[in-house]
């Protein structure tokens, strides 16, 4: 009797749990996108907005979206990716569409878990008495680092806090020590890519800047080493990665100058890939020629002495 009662109780409990799960499914909390604002302490009355992503329980390794200015009393004057958790920008944030829109997309290999900054926007009031700029985030997508490219569930919360003196949102002061505030060290690589042009050489480069954000890159190709890379000349060309090399060979000295918005500069160098092999090969040929001529002269002298 007791055994039958226990068996019936287990069956009823199991069925009850199934019904509860069907009626009240488990809801997983997705990532949240929001922005924080602070007003400048200077007389300019500019406002800085920080676009922030809280990934919650998902590791995010890629995202894309666009920010649009809706308020008529504000002007979008600058964009900064300083301290962003995005390691590589596919489309670096920049002003567009009459300075009222910013588009961006980037990746973070391995993914990121937690709350982090995506980018910062600076707005200038065009009328007196303006409170905070009204913005909209459109076409925002993020991918989970699960090896499948699964789209993350994103909840856009909008402006949730204002903080007059929040460190992360304070205006960046002008750099004094540009070397100390230079972009992060980086390396250069030459590749061939079938998606670009299979018979062309491309230069790959990328770095981050934690002080003020990246401003631009410049590339210089040279047949000879450049001893003073800080000198400005027409040989430096503004460029983005991937950059199609003008000299489609492996013999050039290549320099890339990364400049941040504070004027800090970091230079990366790539020496000719075949320079040492070329030097060794032709030095060996020269040695063979010299030795052969020396032996020929010695043989002629020996022959002359015998006569």
Image: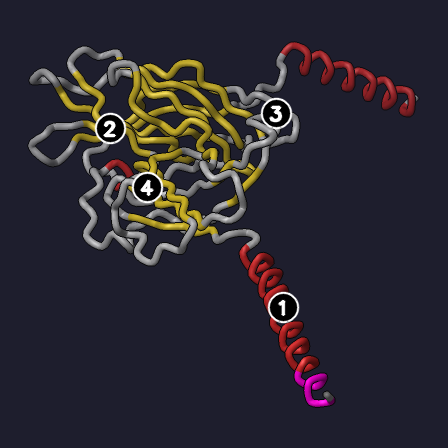
Q: Which mark is residue 289?
A: 1
Q: Comparing marks 1 and 4, which lies closer to the viewer?
A: 1
Please report contact status of discs 4 and 3: CB closer than 8 Å, yes or no: no
Q: How many marks?
A: 4
Q: Secondary structure at mark 2?
A: strand
* Real-space CA distance between mark 1 and mark 2, rounded to the nearest whole angstrom: 64 Å
N-terminal label among 2 and 4: 2
Q: Comparing marks 3 and 1, which lies closer to the viewer?
A: 1
Asked if one can make out residue 209 in the rendered structure from this viewpoint, the answer is yes
187 or 198, which lies in front?
Answer: 198
- Seen at 47% across and 48% down, the residue is 252
Q: Comparing marks 2 and 3, which lies closer to the viewer?
A: 2
- Seen at 41% across and 33% down, the residue is 240
N-terminal label among 3 and 1: 3
* Real-space CA distance between mark 3 and mark 1, rounded to the nearest whole angstrom: 61 Å
* Real-space CA distance between mark 1 and mark 4, rounded to the nearest whole angstrom: 41 Å
Q: Which residue reaches farthest front? A: 307
Residue 170 % position (x, y): 22, 38
Decide: few, some or many residues near mark 3? Use Cα within 10 Å; few <14, some 14-19, many ≥20: few
Asked if one can make out residue 112 in the rendered structure from this viewpoint, the answer is no
- Seen at 59% across and 66% down, the residue is 286
16 to 94, vertically: above or below = above
Which residue is labeled 4 in the image?
236
Q: Comparing marks 4 and 3, which lies closer to the viewer?
A: 4
Q: Which mark is residue 78?
A: 2
Residue 103 % position (x, y): 38, 21
* Real-space CA distance between mark 2 and mark 3, rounded to the nearest whole angstrom: 32 Å
Q: What predominant SS class does the magenta segment belong to?
A: helix
């Amino acid at each position: 009797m007791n055994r039958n009662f226990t068996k019936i109780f287990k069956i009823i409990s199991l069925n009850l749990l199934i019904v509860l799960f069907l009626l009240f499914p488990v809801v997983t909390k997705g990532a949240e996108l929001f922005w924080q604002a602070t007003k400048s302490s200077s007389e300019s009355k500019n406002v800085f907005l920080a676009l922030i992503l809280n990934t919650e329980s998902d590791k995010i390794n890629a995202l894309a979206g666009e920010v649009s200015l809706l308020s008529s009393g504000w002007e979008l004057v600058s964009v900064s990716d300083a301290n962003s958790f995005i390691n590589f920008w596919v489309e670096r944030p920049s002003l567009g569409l009459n300075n009222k829109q910013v588009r961006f997309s980037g990746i973070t290999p391995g993914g990121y878990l937690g709350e982090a900054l995506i980018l910062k926007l600076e707005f200038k009031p065009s009328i007196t008495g303006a409170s905070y700029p009204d913005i909209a985030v459109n076409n925002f997508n993020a991918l989970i680092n699960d090896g499948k490219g699964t789209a993350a569930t994103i909840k856009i919360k909008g402006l949730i806090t204002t903080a007059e003196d929040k460190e992360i949102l304070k205006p960046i002061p002008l750099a004094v020590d540009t070397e100390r505030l230079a972009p992060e060290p980086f390396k250069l690589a030459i590749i061939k890519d079938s998606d670009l042009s299979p018979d062309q050489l491309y230069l790959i480069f990328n770095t981050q800047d934690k002080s003020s954000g990246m401003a631009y890159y410049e590339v210089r190709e040279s047949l000879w080493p450049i001893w003073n890379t800080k000198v400005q000349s027409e040989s430096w060309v503004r460029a983005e990665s991937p950059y199609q090399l003008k000299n489609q060979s492996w013999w050039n000295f290549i320099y890339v100058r990364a400049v941040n918005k504070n004027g800090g500069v970091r230079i990366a160098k790539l020496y000719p890939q075949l320079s040492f092999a070329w030097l060794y090969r032709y030095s060996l040929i020269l040695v063979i020629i010299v030795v052969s001529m020396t032996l020929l002269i010695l043989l002629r002298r020996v022959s002359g002495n015998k006569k």
